[in-house]
Each structure stands twice: as C-alpha cells, then as structure tokens.
Amino acid sequence: MAESSGVMAYAEASKDKLTTTTRELLGIGRNLANELGEPLCAVLAGDGVSSLADEAISLGADRVYVIDDPLLKEYLSDSFTPVMERLAAEVSPRIILLGQTDAGRDLAPRLAFRLKTAATLDCVDLTIDAASKRLQATRPVYGGNALATFTTETDPQIVTIRVKAFSAATADASRKGEVIKAEAGLEPAAVRTKVLDRIVEEVEGLKLEDAAVVVSGGRGIGGAEGFKQLEELAHLLKGALGASRPPCDNGWVSELLQIGITGKIIAPDLYLAVALSGSSQHLSGCSGSKNIVAINKDPEANIFQAATYGVVGDWKKVVPALTEKIRELTSG
Amino acid sequence: MNMIVCIKQVMDPETPPASFKIDPQTNKVIPPPGIAPVPDPYSEYALEAALRLKAENSGKITAISLGNDLLRDVVKKSLAMGADELILLEDEAFAGGDSCSTAIALAAAIKKIGEYDIVFCGRQAADWGASQVGSGIAELLGLPCLTLAQKVEATDGKAKVEVVTDDGYEVVETTLPAVITVSNELGEVRYPNIKGILKAKKKEPIIWKPADIGLEASEVGAAGRCTKLVKLFQPVREGEAEIISGDTPEEAAVNLALKLREIKLI
C-alpha cells in the first residue's frame, strides 16, 4: 500500500442535504488536514447522493468520492464495509472520520478490524501530535466519569466524533474541488442481512437535539403524570421534553427522550434538569449545554456540580410556581 | 439453538462519582474501596436476550468471561441466571487489553467452542465503553453482525432482529450464525432464582489459557493492544451552582424565573 496521506470524512445525508454531523465532520476534518498539510476528502456512499458533492466541497472537501449505487439505498454493515474497505485501499488515507451516528458507530469498528487497524469511537477532542504527526483521540470512558486519550500506530486511524462536540464547517460556495466517481463493486451475495422494516417513532413537538431549551426530568418525578407538568413548561419555553435513563426504563416517557451516553447528546442554550441526580452517564449527554439549571430537593445531588443555577426544593412545589411566573413574564 | 454470550466483569457503574478516582501515574482507575465489581449491565442484557431465545427454542447457552482476577461470585451470576456452561479466559496475559486484543481472544475461544448459532455481546461495556468487541468478533470469524438489538427472534437458520436507531428502530433479518450486540431497550433483566443460585454453586467454570485457544501471550491482553492509552483524566466541572433561594420553594421558583429573565434566557 502506498504511504498514507490525507483525511477522509464519511458523509451522511438526510432529506437531500448533508447532516449537521457531517458538517461537523468536515469542520474538524478541515482543521486536521490543514495541520497535516494534506488534503481532505469526503465520501458520499448511497443511492442518489451524487448531487450532494458540491455541498461537501463548499464545506471544505478538496475531493469528493461519490459511490452511487441502488444497493447502497439503506445502511447495512455487510454492504458498506466492503465499499469503504475498497475505497480506503485505493486512497490510503491517514485518518478516516465518521460521525457517532447509527451508521458510523456500526461501520467504524467493522472497517477497523477489516483493515487491521484500530478505531476510537465517540471522540470529543481530536488533535495531531506535533512530533509524531499521529492523531490523539479523546473520548469519555467509565460512563463519563473520565476521559481517555488514545493513539494508534496503524493507518488508517479511524475515529467517530460525538455529535455536537465539534464546530460545524460553514459553507463557501466559491470553493473548488474535484468530484471522483467510484464503483461500489458490491457482490449482492456478500450481503447477509436485509432491512425488512423501518419504524420511525414520532415524538410530539420539537426535536430534542434541535431545541434551544430542554426541560428534563429524572427518577424523582415519580411517574408519567409528573412529566405532563414538565411538558407544559417545555411548551411554554418553546422547548423540548427530555429525561434521564430511569424514567425511560420505567416507561414513563419514550426511550427516544433519553439524554445521556446511551441516549441523545444535546447542547441547548438552557437545560432545566428537574428531580434528576446527575449521574455521569447523564451529564455526559448534556454537559455541552450553555446553561444548566437544576431543581432538586437534595442539596448534595451531583447535578449541582454541573449546574450554573440551582434551586433546592421539592419539584412538586417549585415547578408549578416556576411555570406560573414564566407564563406571566413571557405573556406580556 | 446454541448461543454464546460474552460477559465482562467491570467496576460497579453505580459507584458514586465522588468515589471515582484515577491514579495519574499509572493511568488507571483506583478500585473504589468497599465497592465490589459486577457483571457488566450491558452484558447482562445480552445474556437476557439469549435466555429469552432459549425459553422459546430450547438450546444451550455458554457464557464466556475474559480477564484476570475474575471473582467467582461475579462471573458465576451468568450460571445462576440460566447459562448452561461458563468458560473463563483467565490468565495474567489477558489483563489490560483493548477491544482489539479482547476480540482476538474471544473469537479464538468461540472458534474452539465450535458449534454456535448466535454470539451475543453487550452494546458496549460500562467501563471503557469502546463498543467494538462484538463487531470485531464478527469480522474475525467472518460473520454478519447486528448492533444495538432490542428484540431478537430466531427460526430456521435466520434471526429477525429489532435494531435501535436514532429515531425508532429497524427490523433486520440476518443469516445465522451471526453476532448480535444487545442494547438496554431490550427491557428488564431477570434476577437469579434460588434454583439457579444453587446450580451455579455446584458448577465449576472451564478455564482456558492463551495456549488453550491457540494464541501466544503476546497476542492477547495488554501485549496485543492496537491502541495506546496516552492519558486518563477526569473532566473539570465548573465549580458550584449559584443557588437561588427564597423563604418557600414557591418563592425560590419565582426568583429563578426572574433570574432567567434577567440573563435573557427566557
């Protein structure tokens, strides 16, 4: 294999646009490529993705590899792993970046083992070591209690980035780049899995990940009824409802509202954490919030360590009064 | 239906954050005093998925745990919950591995076991959470792999698996044998019953060293790592919260609303 060079970003699209995570990938990818003095390329693999190449260039890619094939209509590790394996062998990138998305977190380890190298998933910081030129990848470990920085000596160095942990690239339509069509070269017989059905669970109101305000409840809320009150407050603040893990496990709210290491990662302007203790695994999902406000009757609760403002008190008394006052303040 | 479940022994993830300490000299977590290790909760979801399948299809479940200093009370919980066999890859050489060297050892052990339809792993472990061992085993054994399962059904050499996605789930069919990693959406994990606990007491695990699975000590554990841990450190939390008070909880709530208004958050 030729000596490796450059950074490769695995782009993903949704509704004919590159995803926010892809813009974040191209943002950090551009920085790493500049630091190495090497090019940044993007990979667009899917069915009907060719038209997105220009967008990837405007966001910083020097080259875009387009693999447009009906067999790549939906993500399956059995089909995307050989496609990426083939492209990586052809291009020999030094680094492959993916998002910590449904596809990225599945593909990155498969690809790493296939290429006899290593992957580091869910990274929150990526830097190039000045002396060795190797990638230093930092990720949360021990349920968010600690952070660990890893390096690997083999290329390509594969990492996924945590959503919302890096700044998104801004588009510049005047940027120039090259578009290269590549073949999928897929053997249909090598794909042993098949998507039979795809169920999208509708969550009412604003999407949790996009909301500027999130009102979230924990075990202390005690049941589905209590979450109705939080939902009312969330509506009032034009925000979304969230939860820590226990309410989801107990079925008080949908699993899709779970914020934390195994749930959603959010970074709103205001995070109102009600009757939740603030476990590391939960904080790991919301610590990017600009302001955390905690309401908890236990003054020793861990959430107060992460919060900017706090009220020590029973949420059953605090939340109705808070809702009423906010209604008064925002109605005029 | 023959199933293999990989179960890791981890530091109790319920350890209070205040007891979580790192030794910066060795880049290691200091075991919290008085808090015993536990079976990884995600591994237990994997075992639960296997137990549910066994209840429907009958079959055999072999649990495998890898490491050094494996506590019998911890690893035997799989037997108490209903696993039929327990294999321990237990040796000093297995200590300090990463997903790469762990997957290599587990894949070698699974190959030696020979007959299997499904290999179950947790979606990630509660300690290092690398989330790669299942995918690695699949690659090393040339098997399909489905990650983040919340429901598994198996019939006639195929499995139908519900896989958790960002906005719902997908129903994916795979040929068997396959590797399936299981997520917490699977639902409640059973507690061992008295009969299971007594059975586990009497049953001794099978112990394999690297040589038993055809590997050199240099291929497993710390020596076989593909990644190097440069630094382990604790995130800095930004000090204390400003506590908004009042004579009553209601008054504190009003003061909080006024504060949020003042800083233009509402």
Image: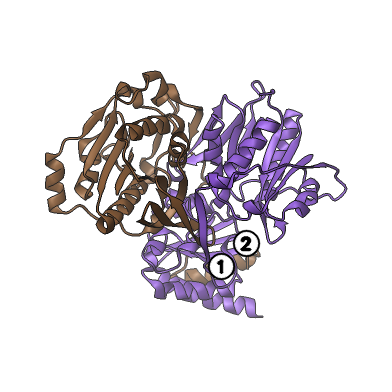
Chain colours: A purple, B brown
In front of the other: B23 or A113: A113
In front of the other: A101 or B111: B111
In the image, residue B173 lies at what x, y percent? 46, 55
Residue A234 shows in the view:
yes
Sequence-first tag of 2 and 1: 2
Residue matched to label 2:
A210
Name the kind of residue labelled 2 in the image.
Asp
Q: Badge 2 sits on which subunit? A: A
Residue drawn at point x = 45 percent, y = 41 percent:
B143
In front of the other: B29 or A67: A67
Residue A230 in the image: above or below residue B147: below
Disc 1, SS:
strand
Residue matched to label 1:
A240
Disc 2, SS:
helix
In the image, residue B139 lies at what x, y percent? 48, 37
CB under 8 Å between callouts 2 and 1? yes
